[in-house]
Amino acid sequence: MSEYTSPLLSRHGAVAASGPDAGVAWHYGDPVAEQRALARGGAVVDQSHLGIVRVAGPDRLSWLHSITSQDVQALSPRTSTELLVLSPQGHVEHVAGVVDDGEATWLVTERDHAAPLAAWLERMKFMMRVEIADVTGDYAAIGEPVAAEGAEGEPVTWWDSWPRVAPGGTRYGPAPEEHPGADRPWRLVLVPRATLAAAVAEREAAGWRLAGTWATEALRVEAWRPRLALDVDHRSIPHELDWLRTAVHLHKGCYRGQETVARVHNLGRPPRRLAMLHLDGSQHLVPDAGADVRTDGPDGRVVGTMTSVAQHHELGPIALAVLKRSVPEDAELTVTGTVGTGEGAQPLTVAAAQEVVVPGDGVSADRPEVRREVMRGLTPRGGDVPQSLL
């Protein structure tokens, strides 16, 4: 799938996406109109570049429950959730949307993570009665702005319930009804890859417009929705990205990385925090993702990284950034990076205003009150978790 090219890229006006969205269209000639159509609930998006892993067998749910961050032991058919695979230190390694059809559990992830995720699951199988298959070559995803689970008789469908707080989860950012992501309905319908073009044409016949990833990324960034391929690095823990909302159950049994999840939730503040940036668009260009975020001024120091960047049809250029927790929430920032690649890359610096996603105090909505020092080296409420424990 690394060389995948969607058949919809042959459409007139299609411009290919790059990076983790390579293989599908960035837009089809009018990205602003496509984004508006998606925002008002009248567009379909080719997401056939995503990866899909299928897990069958009678032990699948109890087994996935025991090795991942989410409680899926009693997951009902056609009920969507999200899970993380964490390192022993609690760092995010894999992220997957999860839905079960009654016979198998389907995991939707980034294209380049499907094979590694399937391989890791295979290594963890031991004597469990499960069958794991990377079915990315057989099934394709179609994105649509619908806030509903798949109904009986429909294809397997994963509904992204972000920013709703799942049972057993918690939040660092605002309540779901006050969250900007509340206005972003989104789900992925899984269809046989051979029927991708026909499934899209069926939706176009119903009046929907075909949109590209320019539109989906702009609405994702506006919704503060983290993405594995862009917003996660080797140090990321779920608290920093507000991922305890949808992907972590705090009261289930042990799993790899669970100690860090509990420790940071109960005793310390995440070392970093996600923020949304409103970028100065007066130069008509913005740096590419991966640019440094600095404090403003001639002696500005690097305080984070711009991880995702998008052009929104109403907000203009916006981005997600992972900042040091110590950066004041009202700090004026600049983004310093490049535009383009190779010999044609040009340096560019733009001003940025931050919008808080994960608050600087690092306290979740239900963080327990710590009234005394539990043990030497661990701090009471308001203190930091020692880096050696992460």
Image (spheres, rainbow, N blue to C red):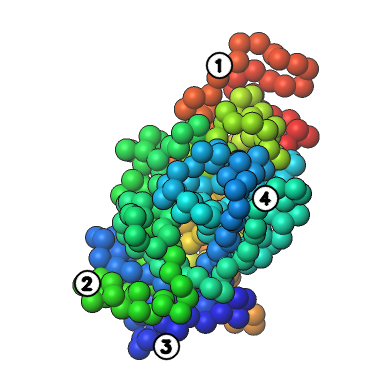
Farthest residue to the left: give it: 207
Q: Position of residue 259 (x, y in %)?
A: 70, 32
Question: Residue under circle 2?
Answer: 206
Q: Residue at x 45, y 84 (%)?
A: 7
For discs 4 and 1, the disc positioned in front in the rendered view: 4
Give the amino acid type for the residue marked by disc 3 in the picture.
Answer: Ser
Ranked by sequence position, the earlier of labels 2 and 4 is 4
Q: Mark on residue 129?
A: 4
Closest to the camera, between mark 2 and mark 4, is 4
Callout 3–callout 2 Cβ contact below 8 Å: no
Residue placed most toward the observer, 270 or 246: 246
- Report whether 156 appears left or right of 206: right
Disc 4 versus disc 3: nearer the observer: 4
Which one is closest to the eye, mark 2 or mark 1? 2
Q: Position of residue 19 (x, y in %)?
A: 56, 71
Q: Measuring 56% from the left and 65% from the top, which residue is drawn there? A: 51
Looking at the image, tell me whether mark 2 or mark 1 is earlier in sequence order: 2
Label ID, residue 10: 3
The residue closer to the viewer here, 290 or 29, is: 29
Q: Secondary structure at mark 3?
A: helix
Tag 4 secondary structure: loop
Quadrant occupied by the C terminus: top right
Q: Which residue is mark 1?
A: 369
Give the amino acid at mark 4: Arg
Mark with earlier residue (3, 2): 3
Q: Residue at x 41, y 82 (%)?
A: 8
Q: CA distance from mark 3 to mark 2?
A: 21 Å
